[in-house]
Image (cartoon, rainbow, N blue to C red):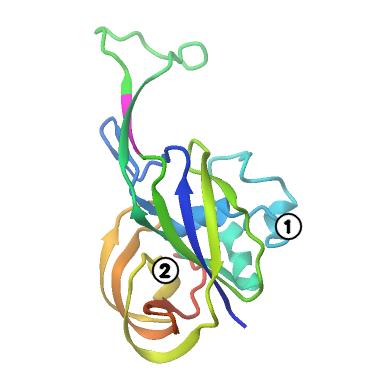
Amino acid sequence: MMHIYHCILELHDSLYFATREIGRLYETEPVLHNYALSYVLGFVDNPRFNTVVAEEHSYRYFCSEQIPKYEEHLTPLNQQGIYVTPGKALNYAAVLNTWKYADNRYYVEMKQTEKNIPSFGRTKEIAPESQFEFFIISERTLVLPHWVRIGKWASKAKLEIKELPKPRHNQSKEFYCSFPLNPLDVMFTNHVLSYDTVNMPPVSLIRNVRMIGEYYTFDDSPELKIPVRMQYRFAS
């Protein structure tokens, strides 16, 4: 039996991650990548779901090298039958913060500048009380946390989780998906007709997607359609 969980994540701190860098402005897009959510929910460094990373260390709090290992960390979740969709903003507000560079001359070789130019940057963050919606598809029952940490600042967020009723499996036909998707995770099992692109690393997402393929529906939420057989996939 397939279990599908509807999740609402509410921020209790401002959320920052650099979706794009525009000069000295580091902007946070109000979309949560499904890679990030998989780490946030503990699916990567919890031995119940992923023994590969858990045997090494807690990847959430310590990273010995700045090299992404998404394929290594997330592929084991395919064998566990677990998949997390990207998160869609239900309501949000942005805040702009200014910060100043620290003096790094104590530990980095730097040349003295000829002009007295202040070194500063700005971050556009997602404000507290903003809410995001996403789904977890699992082949088994999950026990999930009610509080999580997310983003560069390890911002505190509350997680409300509701398991949806048994889904109805629909045969291949055209349908519209109301939440963002990772294109690599759906392109091999669905024929994508149209979409809008959300440019963000490490893989740009798509939203307002119209596609042909198999999908789940629910009797009490007929407008909700979730593609079938989504898995973590990576560009070669």
When the figure is inspected, residue 74 is found, relative to residue 163, above or below; the finding is above
Relative to 165, 198 lies left or right = left
Query: Is residue 130 shown to the viewer in this render?
Result: yes
Q: Which mark is residue 232?
A: none
Q: Residues within 10 Å of mark 2 (few under 14, many from 20)?
A: some
Q: Magenta residues, as a range?
A: 121-125
Relative to 1, 221 lies left or right = left
Q: Name the residue nearer the viewer: 149 or 228.
A: 149
What residue is shown with label 1?
A: 47
Q: Name the residue nearer the viewer: 65 or 51.
A: 51
Residue 212: x and y in percent read 33, 85
Residue 80: x and y in percent read 65, 71
Relative to 26, 67 lies left or right = right
Distance from label 1 to label 2 (Cα)? 26 Å
Q: Quadrant of the N terminus?
A: bottom right
What residue is shown with label 2?
A: 184
Residue 124: say if magenta: yes
Q: Identify the residue shown where x is 58% and y is 61%.
A: 74
Amino acid type assigned to the residue bearing label 1 in the image: Pro
Whether tag 1 and tag 2 are in contact, CB under 8 A, the answer is no
**Numbered-mark total:** 2
Residue 151: say if magenta: no
Question: SS for tag 2?
Answer: helix
Q: Identify the residue shown where x is 36% and y is 67%.
A: 179
Q: Is label 1 or label 2 in front?
A: 1
Amino acid type assigned to the residue bearing label 2 in the image: Leu
